[in-house]
Image (cartoon, rainbow, N blue to C red):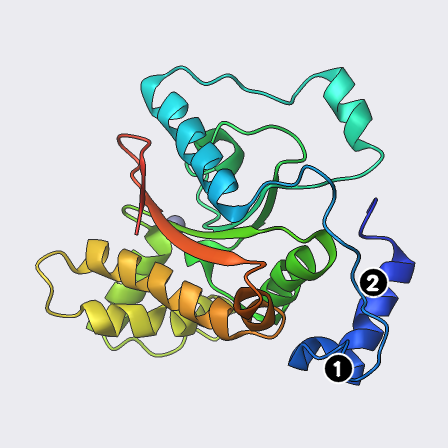
Amino acid sequence: MQDGFDRRRMLRLGAALAAGSVLTGCAAATGHEPATEERHEGALTAEQALARLKHGNERFVAGNALHPGQTRARRGELAAGQHPIATVLSCVDSRVPPELVFDEGLGELFVARSAGQALDKAMLGSLQFGVHELHIPLLVVLGHSKCGAVKATIEAVEQKAPASGTDIDTLVTAIKPAVEKAWGAVDVLATAVRENVKNGIARLAAAPVMSTATAEKKLTIVGGVYDLATGKVAFL
Ligand SMILES: [Zn+2]
């Protein structure tokens, strides 16, 4: 835990959340000292960050990845602090590492991953931290083709399988609404993958911190689906 993640700031964020100033986005109005600092000089806008991710993905697709930001010098620079350009919520699938898919280096992407990019409280808190403390302007919810977690959820619904009693049930519960929406589609899996991304966006957009940041135009949330075969991210 380095810049932006030290214990003092974590506690301060906790205090702000407890006081409700973050939840309601009314820190200034209630007279509380704003818990955040301004974005750093030269920070990208959401549009610029998205354009950069698209260009990086084009390089990756074409086999022309630059693998930037992996030198010893860059590592040293980043020891002083991080200013990621985008947050990516993606699946744990080993074939979808956001840094490679978008051809980005150390310190550029703030990544949270879970199977089928399912959201729970810890994931939501982590993503909110990135917005609130690091002022990351862009949040990408990234699904992918043939997602095993979505496929398993389809099978569970199809077979009316009882809960397994393991924590995998959490994933099924999180992904199930997308599967139900996709039911009857020509390609249920592909449709459910897209619906799952849309559900993720909706849930994030409604979450504390995110809803305020979005209303204040400090955060843009977008979705995309990564194609395992081509490497291309199709933004929704
Ligand atoms: Zn997956």
Badge 2 marks a residue whose secondary structure is helix
Neighbourhood count class around disc 1 (C-alpha, 10 Å): few under 14, some 14–19, many 20 upward? few
The picture places residue 11, in percent across and down from the top left corner, at: 87, 67
Disc 2 + disc 1, Cβ < 8 Å: no
Identify residue for label 1. 29
- Residue furthest left in the image: 186
The picture places residue 69, in percent across and down from the top left corner, at: 64, 23
Badge 1 marks a residue whose secondary structure is loop
Residue at 67%, 79% in the rendered image: 23
Identify residue for label 2. 10
- Residue furthest right in the image: 8
Label 1 C-beta lies within 8 Å of the nearest ligand 1 atom:
no
Residue nearest the viewer, comparing 38 with 106? 38
Tell me, for residue 63, which label it has, or none: none
Residue nearest the viewer, comparing 102 with 149? 102
The picture places residue 96, in percent across and down from the top left corner, at: 43, 39
Label 2 C-beta lies within 8 Å of the nearest ligand 1 atom:
no
The picture places residue 107, in percent across and down from the top left corner, at: 67, 35
Q: Is residue 221 above or below residue 156?
A: above
Decide which of tag 2 and tag 1 comes sooner along the chain: 2
Name the residue type under label 1: Ala
Name the residue type under label 2: Met
Q: Quadrant of residue 60?
A: top left
Number of marks present in the image shown: 2
Residue at 26%, 68% in the rendered image: 179
Nearest-to-viewer mark from 2 and 1: 1
Side of 1 relative to 222 (left or right): right
Residue at 29%, 75% in the rendered image: 161
Spatial CA span between label 2 and label 1: 23 Å
Neighbourhood count class around disc 2 (C-alpha, 10 Å): few under 14, some 14–19, many 20 upward? some
Q: Is residue 60 above or below residue 117?
A: above
Residue at 52%, 47% in the rendered image: 46
